[in-house]
Image (cartoon, rainbow, N blue to C red):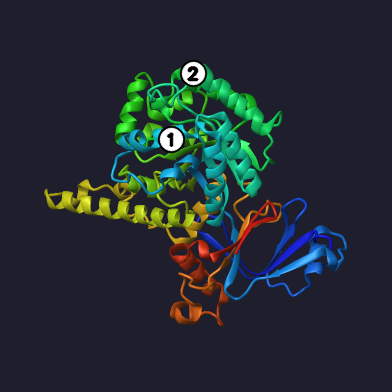
């Protein structure tokens, strides 16, 4: 029997088309063309047959044999796939270790030593398969991966991701200065190997945005890259029309080190900018210690920020101000930053983002209270704009905003928001089926959650909004029962 051309999902459909907007179609229908991998239509409260819906969406009659219906249960919903805008595939080898160390010490003790071992292609072949399967199991349909400096191991990583069916950017890490002798390369080697990796992964179609796995230009960070290396990578990004990823303003010691390497540049951001590495397809991770010059240059260039709160907490780097980015119109998504972060889960990243946001609000509130108590203050000295300037009174990130950062926000950071991130007609079908009632579910039953139960019959949309909030703060990989990328089922329970 031939595979149906179309899938129609029927049941609750949830996404976040705009920041703070949770769109719930409690009894919706969504159609997918499995050949193109794209959404052909979405409807609310539809009672027509699936075949009739498909016929309406594509404008021609379709036989029911070409249509498969996926009926979602009362405890299931469909949502966009999660997007991890920053993670390090080889660092799964020391996941959960070294979190008593600050960034620079952690790099020396764990990162460089473990990444150097991927000169062994056999290690890459055996290890990456397990690591990528774990990422997919956590509902990540699209990820920006850092590899190592080794071309062969990076090609194995790209092949492993492609075979798993996941969408990804994969970067060959570049580091030609201030690096250990056992894990470094010359400037010429770094640039030549990067171009070799680009051609191996993409052939002559490096700029093909429809490809499942694509290369991304990846200077590790400013302290380990010479000016010549950064400039050469900027030229490669332009030559092959490729995105760029790196780290920015993660840790105070790292910021000081970077500025000491390039004392003539106005800011940390300006170092990347002068090398031609800034643009609307650039992903900068962390961005914790950003001064006004950094913020303005990032905003002007359309650079996206990967917020990695687990890592920022775990390595005592600090708390990035997501509200500040949003207010400046800077795209923000979430990253796990394995292994600086100990959880390869964007669900964890959402919760950590909420915790960082609330901790930042509380810290500023308490600092202001202490400052006020320590001196006599004339009420006229407090300007109305003070609270807005330091974000003391900024609203906590809510569940709808966190879901946006994990999906549509991530798609914007990756430069793919016109193709991914929400469940709209014409977009690629990267999506998850969530089941809140799996055995041993960490999410309580709707009937026993009184706040949900009272809305089940009278207002199912309100009930689902509450259940979506529970998903954000309580669910784990057990609740992610199906993972689709480009219309293909790549994981199921």
Q: Is residue 91 left or right of residue 235?
A: left
Q: Is residue 208 left or right of residue 243?
A: right
| Residue farthest along the front direction in this orientation | 122
Which residue: 44% across, 39% down? 285
Q: Residues within 10 Å of mark 2 (few under 14, many from 20)?
A: many
Q: Is residue 100 above or below residue 64?
A: above
Judging depth in this view, the residue of 451 and 215 nearest the camera is 215
Q: Is residue 25 left or right of residue 228?
A: right
Judging depth in this view, the residue of 201 and 129 nearest the camera is 129
Looking at the picture, how far across and down is residue 29, in whole percent?
Answer: 70, 67
Task: Identify the image quadrant of the N terminus.
Answer: bottom right
Query: Whole-Å distance between the Cαs marked 1 and 2?
Result: 19 Å
First reached walking from the N terminus: tag 1 or tag 2: 2
For label 1, the SS is strand
Kindly identify which numbered label has been placed on residue 413. Answer: none
Judging depth in this view, the residue of 398 and 71 nearest the camera is 71
Which residue is identified by label 2? 187
Which residue: 44% across, 81% down? 450
- Can the viewer see residue 428? yes
Looking at the picture, how far across and down is residue 103, in whole percent?
Answer: 33, 38
Which residue is identified by label 1? 247
């Amino acid at each position: 029997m031939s595979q149906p051309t179309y899938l129609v999902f029927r049941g609750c459909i949830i996404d976040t088309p705009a920041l703070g907007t949770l769109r719930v179609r409690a009894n919706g229908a969504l159609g997918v063309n499995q050949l193109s991998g794209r959404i052909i239509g979405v409807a609310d409260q539809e009672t027509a047959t699936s075949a009739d819906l498909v016929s309406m969406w594509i404008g021609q009659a379709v036989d029911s044999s070409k249509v498969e219906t996926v009926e979602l249960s009362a405890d299931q919903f469909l949502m966009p796939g999660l997007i991890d805008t920053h993670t390090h595939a080889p660092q799964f080898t020391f996941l959960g270790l070294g979190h008593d160390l600050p960034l620079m010490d952690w790099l020396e003790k764990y990162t460089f030593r473990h990444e150097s071992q991927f000169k062994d292609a056999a290690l890459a072949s055996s290890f990456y398969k397990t690591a990528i399967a774990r990422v997919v199991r956590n509902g990540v349909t699209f990820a920006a991966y850092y590899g190592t400096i080794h071309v062969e191991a990076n090609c194995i990583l790209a092949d492993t991701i492609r075979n798993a069916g996941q969408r990804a950017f994969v970067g060959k890490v570049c580091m030609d200065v201030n690096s250990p002798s056992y894990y470094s390369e010359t400037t010429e080697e770094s640039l030549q190997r990067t171009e070799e990796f680009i051609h191996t992964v993409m052939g002559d179609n490096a700029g093909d945005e429809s490809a499942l796995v694509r290369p991304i230009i990846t200077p590790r960070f400013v302290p380990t890259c010479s000016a010549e290396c950064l400039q050469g990578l900027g030229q490669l990004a332009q030559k092959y029309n490729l995105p760029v990823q790196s780290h920015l303003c993660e840790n105070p010691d790292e910021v000081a080190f970077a500025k000491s390497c390039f004392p003539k540049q106005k800011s940390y951001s300006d170092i990347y900018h002068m090398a031609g590495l800034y643009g609307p397809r650039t992903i900068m991770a962390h961005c914790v210690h950003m001064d006004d010059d950094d913020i303005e240059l990032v905003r002007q260039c359309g650079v996206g920020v990967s917020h990695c709160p687990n890592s920022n907490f775990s390595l005592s780097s600090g708390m990035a101000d997501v509200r500040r980015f949003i207010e400046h119109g800077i795209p923000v998504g979430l990253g796990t930053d394995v292994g600086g972060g100990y959880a390869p889960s964007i669900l964890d990243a959402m919760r950590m983002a909420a915790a960082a946001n609330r901790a930042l609000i509380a810290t500023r509130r308490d600092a202001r209270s202490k400052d006020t108590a320590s001196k006599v203050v004339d009420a006229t000295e407090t300007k109305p704009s003070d609270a807005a300037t330091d974000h003391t009174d900024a609203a906590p990130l809510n569940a709808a905003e966190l879901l946006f950062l994990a999906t549509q926000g991530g798609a914007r950071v990756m430069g793919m928001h016109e193709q991914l991130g929400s469940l709209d007609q014409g977009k690629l079908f990267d999506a998850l089926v969530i089941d809140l009632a799996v055995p041993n579910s960490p999410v309580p039953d709707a009937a026993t959650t009184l706040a949900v139960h009272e809305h089940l019959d009278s207002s199912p949309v309100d009930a689902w909004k509450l259940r979506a909030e529970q998903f954000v703060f309580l669910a784990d990989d057990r609740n992610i029962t199906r993972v689709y990328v480009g219309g293909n089922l790549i994981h199921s329970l």
